[in-house]
Image: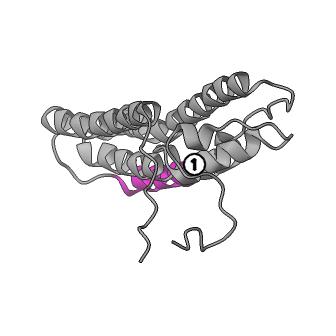
Amino acid sequence: MSTPAKRPQKSPALQTLRYLVGAVIGALFLMAVALMFILGLGAPPLLSVALLLLLGAGAYFLIESVGYRVKALDASLSEDAARQEGMKQFQSSLMRRLAIAESVAVIGILLAFIAKTVLIYDVGASVSILLLMIHVWPSERSVDRVVTGLERDGARTGLREMLGFRGPVDGPVTDLG
C-alpha cells in the first residue's frame, strides 16, 4: 500500500496575500455593522438593488477580461529574475482584481447614504465578497490563470511551486499514488 503524496506547504507569501484578502472581507463586514447604527434598517429601493447587481455582473466580466492580464515574461530571464517578476505581476493583478471587486461595495456605501438604509450597502458588500472569493482569493485556479499568461512565451516562473501549489496538471487524474 502506497502512502499518498503530501501536498506542498503553503508559502508565507501565499499566507500574506490570503491575510490581505481576508482583511478586506472582514472590513466589509465591519462596515455593515457600523452603517447599521448610522443608517438603520429600511426597505431598500429596488432600483438601487438592481443597479448593484448589474454593477456586480459588470465587475465580474471586467475581472474576467482584464483582471488576470499580465505581461508575458521573456524566456531569457534567469530563474530568480523570472520568479521575482512573476510574483510582482501576480500581486499587481491580484490588487487590480481586488479593486474592481471592492468597487461594488464602495458604490453601495454611496447609495446606502442616499437611500438612508444599510441594506443597500449589504447588497453591494455581498456582491463584492462573492467576487473577492471567486476572483481575488489566492487559489490554485487564480495562480494558474496568471502563470499561464506569464509563461506564454516560454519563461518559467516557478510561481505555482513558490506559492505552495503542485504545478500544472495534464488532466483530471494527477496523483496515481
Q: Is residue 50 left or right of residue 115?
A: right
Asked where in the image residue 92 lies, by quadrant, the reply is top right
Q: Residue at x 35, y 52 (%)?
A: 45
From the viewer's perspective, is residue 67 above or below residue 80? Answer: below
Name which residue lies at 66% across and 29% down.
Answer: 83
Q: Where on the picture, by quarter, is residue 146?
A: top right
Tell whether 120 sits left or right of 76.
left
Badge 1 amino acid:
Ser
Between 174 and 68, the one nearer to me in the picture? 174
Q: State the count of labels.
A: 1
Image quadrant where residue 157 sits: top right
* Residue at 36% across, 45% down: 125
Colour scheme of this structure image? one colour
Residue 145 painted magenta:
no
| Residue 50 colored in magenta in the image | yes
Residue 66, how many percent across, how many down? 69, 41
Name the residue nearer the viewer: 176 or 157: 176
Q: Which residue is mark 1?
A: 142
Question: In the visual, does 140 lie left or right of 36?
Answer: right
- Residue drawn at 25 percent across, 34 percent down: 31
Taking 132 as reference, is 85 above or below it?
Answer: above
Q: Residues within 10 Å of mark 1 (few under 14, many from 20)?
A: some
Q: Residue furthest front?
A: 1
Q: Which residues are magenta?
A: 45-57
The secondary element bearing badge 1 is classed as helix
The one nearer the camera, 45 or 28, is 28
Q: Position of residue 61 (x, y in %)?
A: 63, 52
Which quarter of the figure is the N terminus placed in? bottom left
> 90 and 26: which one is in front?
90
Per the picture, the main secondary structure of the magenta-coloured stretch is helix
